[in-house]
Image (cartoon, coloured by chain):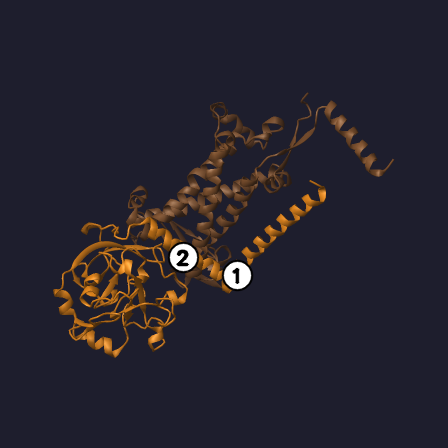
Amino acid sequence: MTPAVQVEQWARAMDATTETTEPKQKVIDRHSGTVRITHWVNVICLLVLLMSGLQIFNAHPALYLGSKSNFDNPVMAMRPMRHGNDVYGVTKIFDWHINTTGVFGLAKTADGGYQIRGFPWSVTLPGHRDLSMGRRWHFFFAWVFVINGLIYLIWSIASGHLRCDLAPAVRELKHIGASIWEHIRLRFPEGEEAKHYNVLQKLAYLIVALVLLPLMLATGLAMSPGMDSGYPFLLDIFGGRQSARTIHFVTASAIVLFFVVHIVMVLISGVWNNLRSMITGRYVIKFPEARS
Amino acid sequence: MSKGSRLDRRGFIAKGLAIAGASMLGGCDSELSDQPWVRRILDSAETLTRLSQRALVPPTALAREYSEADISKDFKANGSTNIDDDNYRALAANGFADWKLKVDGLVGQPLELTLAELRVMPSRTQITRHDCVEGWSCIGKWTGVQLKALLDKAELKSSARYIVFYCADDLAETGDDDGKYYESVGLIDAFHPQTILAYDMNGAALPIAHGAPLRLRVERQLGYKMAKYVMRIEAVDKLAAIRGGQGGFWEDRGYEWYAGI
């Protein structure tokens, strides 16, 4: 008997075993190629957009409401403030003043000194102060983000991904309380249920893909004096250019919050299985022991 | 699919992600930003943005005009706010009565106009929002002569493609022309009804901090396009031969020539 025939026989024997008994686990194709590719392109885009966006923000680290900047009363600002002989970095949010020396307003530099700037060098692109390069990075990756996002959205609608995988059923929405409770106890769906997104995932992904990311684009365009002349409603829907800039910042913060929660969920619900499913598509589903 | 090829594919993807990750770290360190090929790729977005906005926005679409009540009490003066130059000081001391605006280059009829001559030409007044590249906005009322009227008067030649504005302020403080502010616009913006050379701001003569005696308003672009202390206007067919060759003071220092966003 040749080794190849031997291996063939073992494989058949193993197949026979798995057919007769309840499988303990099963490998499925979880994410389509389009989802996987657009996901990782989006990761790179959002990282570059965030860091270059903070570089742009640092050029004038203050936010306002309305059409124009009321320099005396920003709704948020990061700036140095003198108190006696000392200088502090102060972050103002509405009427609260928070001492953020070393991080915001008066940031630590790479060599341990202090520098007057909004966000520190470690989170901006480029690391040193360079508004023009920040803008170049930002607008190039904004285009990649828009094209990638359009591919994802058109494909999601055409393929039924949006309707079948992402839109939550009424039944699911009714049991959202139970799903939240299970997440709080860090219990994640197993078996058949794990083949699909759960209701909280569906809502989170829908809010990000259909609300937060399009809102980033729309508020970004509302800051463009060129686009504003052709499409003045951009100014009206957000309450003026400076409000649009503030909403752009707050929405970016919400996306960072989603990112943190997303990473935590990936880590605690099986990091390698999750990562593999977003790279090769393959995802292992475990069936509970008690199931028969 | 054999096991070997799947591992290869995984290896390939892992390598790709590693390169992307390393590029990010490199970017933080600014080394990536200094690579000419990176600059070329990133800069290509400007062309895409310009062509898209030109396609999406009608050439005559007007920037929003605001009401008197919207005018900023504290309109921030950016860039040069005064000029430390004997020639300019002498002009200012005399209320710019001896100042003359030159219009030359690819024109049939070069002009030299005094402030008084500009003031008797038909004027346009507009209350508009000034968006600085840094992110802030101020609203001001501007009165001046439409650039189109000046170009018509000077009989702009059909070979002209750009209008260049030469300014009195030595923003880079080099002491020669290389450090002086200049700007340029294409013909779409040059002929736009809201593109004016303003001599009045908020109902009074343009203050020195805001570019007296004359500043450009290009309302559909960012603040750095709106040259202050304009001394001379030249019509040209290309920008490459002028100073840094990028069409403006900030453009020569890395900023976009098309500043519509």
**Judging from the image, what secondary structure is the residue with disc 1 in?**
helix
Task: Say which chain tag 2 marks.
Answer: B
Residue lying at the far left of the rendered structure: B120
Residue furthest right in the image:
A1
Image mark for residue B46: 2
| Three-letter code, disc 1 | Leu
- Image quadrant where one finds the N terminus of chain A: top right
Q: Mark 2: which amino acid?
A: Glu
Front in this rendered view, residue B216 or B70: B216
Q: Quadrant of residue B172?
A: bottom left
What residue sits 78% from the left and 30% below the top? A12
Q: Is residue B136 above or below residue A187?
A: below
Vertical arrangement, residue A7 with respect to residue B197, above or below: above
Is B103 rendered above or below residue A258? Answer: below
Left or right, residue B151 beside residue A259: left
Q: Residue furthest front?
A: B158
Q: How many marks?
A: 2
For label 1, the residue is B32
Q: Residue at x 44, y 50 (%)?
A: A143
What color does chain B have in the rendering? orange
Label 2 Cα crowd, 10 Å radius (few <14 / some 14-19 / many 20+): many
Say which chain is brown.
A
